Image (cartoon, coloured by chain):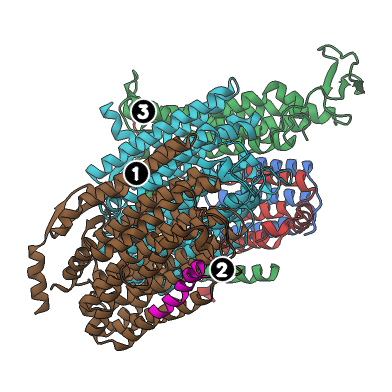
Chain colours: A brown, B cyan, C red, D green, E blue
Amino acid sequence: MLAKKNKEFFELMETIGSIRPLLAILASALVIPLIILSRGSPNLRELWTMVGAVLKFMIVFSMLPMVLAGTQIECTLAQVLPGFALQLRVDALGMLFALVSSFLWIITSLYSIGYMRGLQEHDQTRYYSFFALSLSATVGVAFSANLLTLYLFYELLTLSTYPLVTHHQDQEARSSGRKYLFFILGTSIGMILPAMLFIAHKTGTLDFTSQGIVAGRISGQATSFLVLLFVFGFAKAAVMPFHAWLPAAMVAPTPVSALLHAVAVVKVGVFSVARMITGIFGTGWLDDLGLSTLICGLAALTIIVSSLIALSADGLKRRLAFSTIGQLSYIILGVALLSKSGMVGGLLHIGMHAFGKITLFFCAGAIFVATGVTNVSQMVGIGKRMPLTMSAFFIGALSVIGLPPCGGFISKWHLVLGTVEAGQFLMLGILLVSSLLNAAYFLPIVYRAFFCSPSESMFEGPMAEAPTWCLLPPLLTALLSMVLFFYPQPFLRLARLGVQAITGG
Amino acid sequence: MGGMTEHLPAIIVAVPLLAALIVTVVWWFNDRLCFPLSVAAGLVVCGASANLFQKVLTQGVIEYRLGGWPPPVGIVFRVDHLNGLILVVVTLVAFLNLVASRRSAEKEFRDKVGAFYALFLLFITGLFGILITGDAFNLFVLLEIASLTGYALIGIGSGRASLSGLNYLLMGTIGASLYLFGVGILYVLTGSLNMVDIAGILPNLWPSSAIVLAFLLCMGGLFVKMALFPLHAWLPNAYTHAPSVVSSLVAPLTTKVMIYAMMRVALTVFTFDFAFNQIAVRGPILWLAILAIVGGSLMALSQRRLKKMLAYIVVAEVGYMVGGFWLGNKAGMSGAVLHIINDAVMTLCVFLAAAAITIRTGDDRLSSLRGMFKRMPLTMAVMVLGGLSLIGVPPTCGFFSKWYLISGGIEAGHLGFVMALIISSLVNVVLFFRCFEIGYFEPFMRGGEPHSAPVEPGYGAPTVQEAPVEMLFALLTTALLLLLLGLFSGQIVTRVIHQALPAVLG
Amino acid sequence: METIGTLIIAKYNYWAVVVLIAIGLYAMIAKKNLVKKIIGMNIFQTAIILFYVSIGAKRGATLPIIEHGHGESTHMVHAADYINPLPHVLMLTAIVVSVATLGVALALAMRIYFHYGTLEEDEIQKKIIGDEPDKIDSSG
Amino acid sequence: MKRLGLIAIIIFGGLLFSITFELPDLGDASSPASTHVSPYYIEHTLEDTSVPNVVTAILADYRGYDTLFETAVIFSAGLACFFLLRIPERKAPKARFYRHLTTGLTLRIEKGGRIPEESKEFERIDSAWVPNDVIINMTCRLVVPFVQLFALYVIAHGHHSPGGGFQGGVIFGAAIILFAISNNLRSTTRRLSEKSSALLGSGGVIIYLGTGLLCILLGAGFLNYSGLSVFPGLDPVSARSYGILIVEIGVGIAVTAVMVWIYYNLASAGTQEEGL
Amino acid sequence: MIWQLDLIILLMVVICGIAAISIRDLLGAAIMFGAYSFMMCLLWSIMGAVDVSFTEASVGAGVSTVFFVAAVFRTTRRTRD
């Protein structure tokens, strides 16, 4: 019955071939030579970065109307293996992610300029080049039509972010970089690659389809094993215990943490997991096997544990990192609930959390640039010195916690609805508890920044904000977080379309 | 010239041989001419092999009778999809290496440049000959010419090189003699030396332990030559102590060509049915391959010299190809053949990069990589690409051959092989990123003092001092090849390699 | 007794080949002196040549040089009258290969002697350990 | 190691031993080796090449390609020994030694001293002690020309009797080596310098390879000497016969030169000064 | 082929071979190797392989031995096994 309905739905759907997805990916990669060539003049170099960013967003955005109209855009690059092509396909899910990441790249680029110049960082050319490369990889993951292509861009992302994470080239960066590679490259080679080959061998295809390709071709036991391999193997999703790289990677310059570890890298992880659940395993098959509970359980565990760790973390970026780990699992949880609202919520959270979390990271960076402070315990009274920054921080925090009037509320609302729909009341409880925990580790920072006795305050004197280019981006993203509450399109529409494509309703 | 194309196979061996002789003569009068002459010969051979491959693709198997005698009376060249493909890659790799060798050859063999180029050309002549010959005994002769020149080229290095060279010579001679012995037994039993002819006669004699022994001797001899674990002992030292320009020639080519010879002997002489169904050697050889992969990788971990580490990686890679071939299914064999060409390019890439670094630092310890990303950015970029390819990261070519090998392992249900491949990939990650870390994090040292303040590696860093132009050209071309082979691997496999595999596999 | 006698007559060359191969291999593996190893290598190679020559032998046949009259040589040549020439040709090549290998091997051995001052493998190993303090680097 | 090697060898030997029973008997005229391909050579050599020595015919024609590379192997060995051992000439030695031929006295002339001019009375030698035995010298001088003559005969008569380019070349080379051993290296290199031996070595192989390539240019295949029949007075069969002769001469030259070349380098440890 | 003669020469070959690898003097070993080669060439000429034995006589017993002697002369006669 369901399958039939699905089929009808797909007949309505159109697929057109176009080179535009490829252009969207290449837009940032192609500016790299220009960036390197103009390494002598910083202004020109950063102009190229901005050109790449804007161009990329425009191309992605130009495909939005088609996707909203229910069209898929396809582009086959090369038939690299018999039966397995490097293929790009833009659907609602990918569009959602690409839109978020390419838009936030523009803002991050602006922020980078302020941050990197403010701190007089070294090797900025390398920094901008690899930044552009990693964005290419991110959009590539978003637009992948099959697991092989996704794997390619996933690995590209890992490698292109390594120099960014270890940008400082000191001992700490070195050990963090090691951890980063160990977890991410190790899992992708050790777990994803064999799992992918196993599926390819058993099914003869790796394409993402709405029903999944595994159903009926691989036994239930093997499927559960594969699910575990994928959920843990995409270590960028930081499901515990494969999360340790994320706090370590916070040694990176803040813009890197902001874009990559709030938006690109980690979201690539959860996006990949979501793709596996919807496109490879198929929701129906997972439901039949009852594996939803397994994934939900893993996610729930990660949510609670990471929130508890975040409570006790003193470094602001470290706290944000653990918060990110928890929020990522929301997305996995939402998708794994397999109920319509839950999935909408999960997918929406990719976007909503991105805006909220990037604001928080921007603020953390701005604080560091302006005062050099990195620990929460040293931020008492900072609201008086940097009121604008801390206001933005407050809004970002609200969004991440999931309170109105911020975008985060919308996604969390859907998640809650989803748990009810799926009848998973335990998960509902966990969502609520974790929201409380979120509030518990964010709000005190804000509270003590503004409301403290003068004797406690560590900052005084007149208002001294961070440089303009560090200040504007967080304000902008904070504003956008609020806007998204009132006007959650096109993300909501995209998420709904995506879920529709999967469940066929 | 239309008439000449039918003589292409002869040209492929005759031209480098002639060039070697002419270089020897010319060198006594003017040593400037050696390099251009060699390069010209390399170009001709590259063109000829590409042309020949094109012909094979359109016309199928090409047979060339030497002296006009039909087989089995005379010797024939037999070029099919398998050796046509490998020939193209081997000629290309040899050519690139020839181009890259210029500066370091002039530096290291100042007054023997002519002899170096002549030996170089004779070496590649031997390899080309092995690739195209259709005669079991002729293969031995060409094997010896390639080996003999290889011993000399390796032994010329400083320090322990001569000892490694002599060890290689002793082991190599045992290998070649075992092979010769195996061919002798085959000759006693069949009365023929032509590969195809022997294959036609052997099935009548099948339940014979003498054939099994002949098979084991041939394989054993080739295993020694290709350094399959546990017969690999000669390889790491030989490749480490050889002059770097020589190791970048010998390392990518020798083992690959020997693996080709193994395939040729197993498939064409003994036939697929015999090698895989009649005798039970598949299992043990597979386990040897697994040991080679794991052992080579682990040994590589404990090395502190770049070239020695790479040499142990070569040992592991031999395991890949041997294992893939002896999986005996279509995916595994395609993977093995694909890996021969990919690995030739990958190994060339990393060994050339190592040579470039050795030229600039005069040292191949891992610590000499310090600050190399600043000092030789392009070389290191190429090395990163080569490393990624050896790790097996898409879209470099190494990923695709690994794909076939692993799926072959899954298809055969041989979990040990799959696990070994994955472990070795992970170890390669550690190996290469250890190198990259040193190059990236540790500042360039000169005379024990950090050349630039470690706090600010960006400023006052040592000036860029890239590899010589010729070498850089070769490096960049190799890097390009790595990507191209990756992107076109689908076509290579379906259009070429599948034609080359025995028909039994479908 | 009779059968054993004929068996010996029929196979003794092969057995000699086996013995010589064993001698050669033993020298290559067990002897520490490099020149001894090289001698062993040559014995090993000649053993295989002997094997080929034994293949070519043909009872009741003569040297593979065809008797012929000048001008009109019309009488039939019977293959059974002449020893199989093909293995001889192959072995000419093999002998030449072995002398070539010998030359290169001796050249290498001389280089080793000039570098280490000895031809004994174990003494060389000791010198290597003494020469290179970073021996750990190159172990294995 | 010793014991382990011994055990391995015994096992290997046992394996080989057990196989011998499967092989055809020694001298068995009906073995496949004697019945499959080799009768063709014996029965067709005369009509194909008009060379009665079947071994020569196979060596230089039927399997001429093998032999080409066999020559190349020898050449490589010469080149390899040169490459490995040759030490570039040292500049101005400290002292020079001369021998007064009639008395057998050795003169040591320090650097800067007056060096005797080229004369029949003095001969330059390399070290204070270079043996000079008149009997050996003279005997060898007498023997060497005959050995060389025999070598030439072996090369030229290879069509009809055992022998050919290789054997002749080696014998010719051995004659020169004999001269070098009995006299000294310096007087030998004066007659056949290292340069000319290297040039002759590659020249010999070039003759072989060139003949093969010439056949291509004349429209036949590589090493197909019947292509030489375009020259006047040759039919394909006699063209093959002459082709074989040319090739054997090439082999002879190459082998002679390379053997001498290897000897020079081995005997003088690469200095080309003081022989055995 | 006279197999009795064959056997005797074979025996000599084996003895020379063993002697060549066991004499504790490299010059002696080289000479024994020459003898070995010469015996081998006799054996082959009895077996009818005249060309091969011709070559072995000149190459194996002749030039090879000279090479060995030259190498030993330039290095050392000493050996411990």
Q: Which chain contains the residue that carries disc 1? A: A
Q: Which residue is mark 2?
A: D12
Give the Cα separation between the discs numbered 1 and 3. 63 Å
Left/right placement of residue D135 relative to residue B402 reads right
Question: Which quadrant of the figure contains the N terminus of chain A?
Answer: bottom left
Magenta region includes residue A365? no
The residue range painted magenta reads: A435-453
10 Å crowding of disc 3: few (<14), some (14-19), many (20+)? many
In this rendering, the label closer to the viewer, 1 or 3: 1
- Choose between C59 and A10: the one closer to the eye: A10
Q: Which residue is mark 1?
A: A52
- Choose between B489 and B187: the one closer to the eye: B489
Disc 1 is placed on an element classified as: helix
10 Å crowding of disc 1: few (<14), some (14-19), many (20+)? many
Amino acid under label 3?
Cys
Residue B58 percent coordinates (x, y): 22, 42
Q: Do pointers 1 and 3 mark residues of a single chain? A: no
- Dots 2 and 3: beta carbons under 8 Å? no
Residue B410 percent coordinates (x, y): 35, 71
Q: Which disc number belongs to residue D215?
A: 3
Give the answer, above or below, for where B364 lies relative to B322.
above
Q: Which chain contains the residue that carries disc 3? A: D
